[in-house]
Amino acid sequence: MEIEKLVARINELSRKNKTVGLTDAETAERDELRQQYLSNFRRNFRQQLDNITIVDGDDTIKH
């Protein structure tokens, strides 16, 4: 699922939960979508960290 659609659906379920509550199926869907979002976030964050290169004052490169 596309990240924008994923976030939109999570937000929609969150708003509904605050107003009228969620069914068991909707609660399960919300939990699954949150896990997908977190998994995607962690993967992207890890990729960013893996691409960082630190250069010391003596021009030594550290990964």
Image (tube, rainbow, N blue to C red):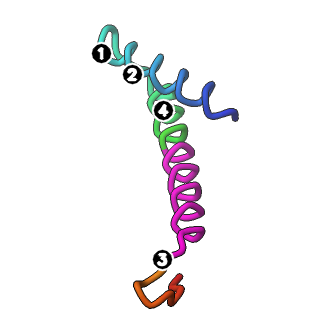
Q: Which marked residue is nearer to the observer: mark 3 or mark 1?
A: 3
Q: For residue 14, which numbered disc appears in the image? A: 2
Amino acid on which the number 1 mark rests in the picture: Lys
Q: Secondary structure at mark 3?
A: strand
Q: For residue 54, which numbered disc appears in the image? A: 3
Amino acid on which the number 4 mark rests in the picture: Arg
User: Which residue does the numbered mark 1 point to in the structure image?
Assistant: 18
- Of the image marks 2 and 4, the number of the one nearer the N terminus: 2
User: Which residue does the numbered mark 4 point to in the structure image?
Assistant: 30
Tag 2 near tag 4, CB within 8 Å: yes
Q: Does 15 appear in magenta?
A: no
Query: In this picture, which residue range is highlighted in magenta?
Result: 35-54
Compute the Cα span from label 3 to label 1.
Answer: 45 Å
Amino acid on which the number 3 mark rests in the picture: Ile
Q: Which of 43/60 is in front?
A: 60
- Of the image marks 2 and 3, the number of the one nearer the N terminus: 2
Compute the Cα span from label 1 to label 4.
Answer: 13 Å
Q: Residue furthest left?
A: 18
- Of the image marks 3 and 4, the number of the one nearer the N terminus: 4
Tag 3 near tag 4, CB within 8 Å: no
